[in-house]
Each structure stands twice: as C-alpha cells, then as structure tokens.
Image: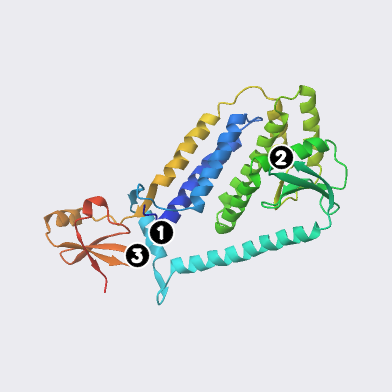
Amino acid sequence: MNVSVSNTTVITATIMFSILSIFVILYMKRKRQTFSKIEVLIFLALCIVINIRLFFPLEFPFTYSLYLSGIYFNVCNVLDRSLYHSVTVRDILLAIELLGILLIGSYKIFNYIRLVWLTKDAEFIKTLEISRHKRVHIYSSRIIREPFIVGVWKTKILLPKEKIVGTNYIIEHEVQHYKNHDLYFKLLFEIISVIYWWNPLIYVMRRYFYNMIELHNDFSVTKGISEEQKISYATTLIEVAKFKHTTKFGIGINSQDSFLKYRVYSIFEKKRSKGFLFLLVLMFFSFLSFFVVIEPYDTPSMADNEFLMQSDEMYFIREPTGYCLIVDGEKVGLLEKIPEELRDIVVLEDK
C-alpha cells in the first residue's frame, strides 16, 4: 500500500483541524453547567482523532482528491514563488517553523529535566500495585504545590508536603490517569503543539482536552459512591483548586478555575445530555478527513475548455510544483496531481 505525505496533505490536515476546532469551541461556549459521561468520552475521542490526523498528514491509496481553484490555488501558488534564486516562500516558512520547533521543544525538554532534578530528593511514601506487572510509586516533595502524576515510562505520583483534604480521593484520581494512559495522550498533544506552534487553535483544544480528561476521571472516581461521598470528593476538588495550577509535564487533579463548576455540577447530574449527537457528527467529519485531500487547481477559462476539446495535441510537463497542462503549445492549467480522467495524457519531464 502506497502512503505519501505532501504539502497538500499537511495543508488539508491543518484546514480540517481548524474547522473542527472552531465547531468544538462554539459547542463548548454554548454549554451551561454539566457534561454527561458519554459526552466526555466522545469529546476525548474526537480530540484524539483530529490530533492523530495532524500528527500523520498522510495520503492513502483510498484518499479522494478534492480539486479547488481560486483563492486556494493562488495561496499554494504564492507558497511556491521564488524569492531568491531557488528559495521559495514555502522554504522560508518551513525554516521559521523548524526554528520555532527547535526553540519551543528545547524549552519544554529543559523544564522537564529541571522538574526531575528538583524532585530527585522527593520522599518515598509507598507503592501501589495496579496489576500484576504495573506499579506506581508515590512520593512527597516540598518543591511542588499540587498533586500530579508524571512520567510516561517511570510513572510516579507526586504529592505536596502540605496536607490536603481528601488525599485518598487525590491518589485514586491520579491512579485513574495511569489506568487510562492519559500521560501518553498528553505527550501526543504536547508534541503536536510543538510542531504546530503557530496555530492558536492548538492551545485552545489542548486546554479543553486536559479539562475533559479531569472530568472523565471524576466520573470514574465517583462511580457507584453515595451522595455524601460525592460531596466529600467535590470538597477535595475545591480544596485543590486553591493551589496555583502549575502542572506542565504531568497530569493532576487540578484544572482551570473556570472549569471547576462544570466538574462539580457534572458529578451530581443524573440526566443524560443530548449534546453528544453534535459531537458524533464532528467525529464523522474527523474520520472523513483521513479520506480527503484538497488539491490546488488552476481552472481554465471557457475559451480554454473549448480549445481543449478541439485540440489533439495535449500533454503534461512535470514541474517541481506539479503538472502543467499544455494544449497546442499553450499553458492551460497547473495540477499538483493528475486526476483519473486525464491519466491517458502523456507526461513529459521538465528540462
């Protein structure tokens, strides 16, 4: 199976991500107070799918090419415009993106190493055996102010020295992060936010995703417990919210202050929200993005079309930016890929 990546697959993945993100943001802005469990699950799955598409902007043999002209073609044409000798606008933008990836990636790695160094003297408390081959070690440290779980490979729960109400709930919440592999998903989001650092929608979606992860764990911890115990858990959430949210490389029980009320209301809500139907529609389009790639097409004029139909001398010239269609010695259009209906036309190499 032939799988490829090109400029148009990257652009298509970015466009689809941006459109879906805008709809997600509008959906989140309309929410009142509560989320249902199924709503949270679909939301998390949607975020994972659209981010995987960004991480793997590939074109498959079954991918359908959607040809667009006008503004889209003009933008792609500008990207291939030479500025100095063979250096194009696309080359300049790629260099800026790589520089941003290098700087932001180095900053994140430095801060993670710094966190490891600052907590190397953390005091060991105990080990939790999750399953036969899975264990999580719990430590306490004077350096941190809020509890969180960290480490994709050597996972550990870090608790502050300062006593917090509901420590058992906190530990159970962090263990749920481990069971749900949330750290792997956070790592994926962090990598994507580094690669696409120039897209502001990445940071909005990342914030929503982290908040919904916390709510998903709230549902897991409060499943099957009494109303009194839910009140105790909600009290723990409020207590933890008093600490400044500083977790960057792990996942904790904390979340943005503005999202706290949604978490508290949602764990007591018994009605099922109907909003998940809209999320299902977005999920469908997120899967659809794997099967579509948008290609630029310079649409010939009506006169050119008539000329094309009457001509017997047609061929393509393969250029660095695509395939140039020549009819009776005149340039008619430029395609990045040759559509199926024109496969029988001869292709010549540009000399």
Residue 164: x percent and y percent? 85, 40
- Amino acid type at circle 2 is Ile
Mark 3 or 2 closer to N-term? 2
Q: Nearer the viewer, residue 334 or 46?
A: 46
Name the quadrant containing residue 77.
bottom left
Q: Contact (CB < 8 A) between labels 3 and 2?
A: no
Q: Identify residue for label 2.
A: 130
- Amino acid type at circle 3 is Thr
Residue 162: x percent and y percent? 88, 46
Mark 1 or 3 closer to N-term? 1
Mark 2 or 1 closer to N-term? 1
Mark 1 and mark 3: Cα distance apart in space: 11 Å
Q: Identify residue for label 3.
A: 321
* Label 2: how many Cα within 10 Å (few below 14, some 14–19, many 20+): few
Q: Contact (CB < 8 A) between labels 2 and 1?
A: no
Mark 3 and mark 2: Cα distance apart in space: 54 Å
Residue 70: x percent and y percent? 34, 54
Residue 23: x percent and y percent? 52, 40
Residue found at x 81% / y 51%: 144
In this rendering, the label closer to the viewer, 2 or 1: 2
Q: Contact (CB < 8 A) between labels 1 and 3?
A: no
Res 6 label: 1
Mark 2 and mark 1: Cα distance apart in space: 43 Å
Asked which secondary structure carries label 3, the reply is loop
* Label 3: how many Cα within 10 Å (few below 14, some 14–19, many 20+): some
Q: Nearer the viewer, residue 203 or 138?
A: 138
**Number of labelled discs?**
3
Residue found at x 47% / y 42%: 286
Compared to 317, does 164 lie above or below?
A: above
